[in-house]
Image (cartoon, rainbow, N blue to C red):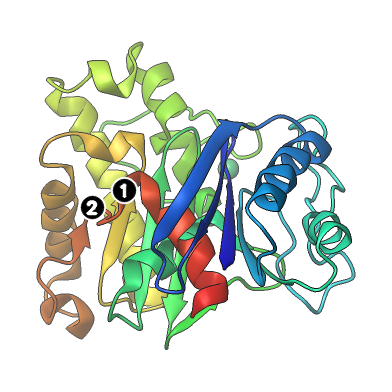
Amino acid sequence: MIAGIEMGGTKTVVAVGQADGTVVDEFRFPTTHGEETFKVAIDWLRERGEATAVGVAAFGPVSVNKARADYGQMLQTPKPGWAGFSIIGALESAFPDVRVVLETDVNAAVLAEAEGFEDIAYITIGTGIGGGVMADGKLLHGAVHSEFGHWFPRRAPGDDFAGVCPFHGDCLEGLASGPAMTKRWGKEPKDLLDDAKAWEFETHYLAEACMTLLASVNPARVVIGGGVSQAPGFHAQVEEKLRARAKGYFAALEENTPFVVPPKYGQQAGIRGALLLVGS
Ligand code: ZN
């Protein structure tokens, strides 16, 4: 038996399942602070017998680089009860003989969505914006972990919104996250579906994001998920803007249609990815 834990900002999913990512049994519960959240997950797993391995898909900021002294820990975060909490420590003391593999939540989703692709990227747009990348079949995370939401896109023509990122103002997350849309238009994204201008701006920024991925890590496909991406026609509009920017220059884009797609596994991508971390 293998197990997976997907830590989300508001809910945590713990599951047992198969090496191919199939979930056999799962439990969803509200995320509180580190100690308590992991106690609930560990107790649930114990009731199901001893797993041989546990894959963890963690929200950030989390140290996923094994070369660092703080590997396995949550880094500085305003989220109460998480800074300095050791995910690896909690699981290893509960299950001393169990193999534990830790990844960022977006990289776990990349793994679930890859299915046959060795070069693929995943962007999620919700309360924040996150990105994960698989290149040459390997998940990338760099020195600490990716902060893909915090790079600086070109402005959409006519957009003078200051942005909502407390650190940078108008980084991608500051301009295009769910809270950015709500602040900019005075309505939540789900109440903006008929507002063409709102989606003109939103898809502009996501096309900028795809362009940066295309030019830097050269994926054969970009998956965009998260609540904000569920507007009708969203992915096609991003792809159209991306192709208009790329001007036929990038082989990876020319050879792959569609290039910008919704997640195949939707809400299940994270927990499937957590199982695949130890199953594959
Ligand atoms: Zn920022």
Q: Which of marks 1 and 2 is in front?
A: 1
- Is the shortest distance between ligand 1 and the CB of mark 2 under 8 Å? no
Residue at x 78% of width, y 55% of height: 87
Residue at x 81% of width, y 74% of height: 97
Which residue in the protein does label 2 denote? 262
Residue 23: percent from the left, percent from the top? 42, 56
**In the image, 258: left or right of 102?**
left
> How many marks do you count on the picture?
2
Q: Residues within 10 Å of mark 1 (few under 14, many from 20)?
A: some
Which residue in the protein does label 1 denote? 266
Q: Give the camera-side residue of 56 and 64.
A: 56
Residue 16: percent from the left, percent from the top? 53, 57
Residue 264 visible in this rendered orientation of the protein: yes
Q: Give the quarter the ligand 1 occupies.
A: top right
Q: Give the camera-side residue of 21 and 102.
A: 21
Under circle 2, the secondary element is loop
In the picture shown, does residue 2 fall above or below 186?
A: below
Task: List the single residue furthest toward the bottom.
Answer: 136
- The quarter of the picture where residue 92 lies is bottom right
Assess whether mark 2 and mark 1 are in contact (beta carbons under 8 angstroms): yes
Task: Check disc 1 and give the amino acid type.
Answer: Gly
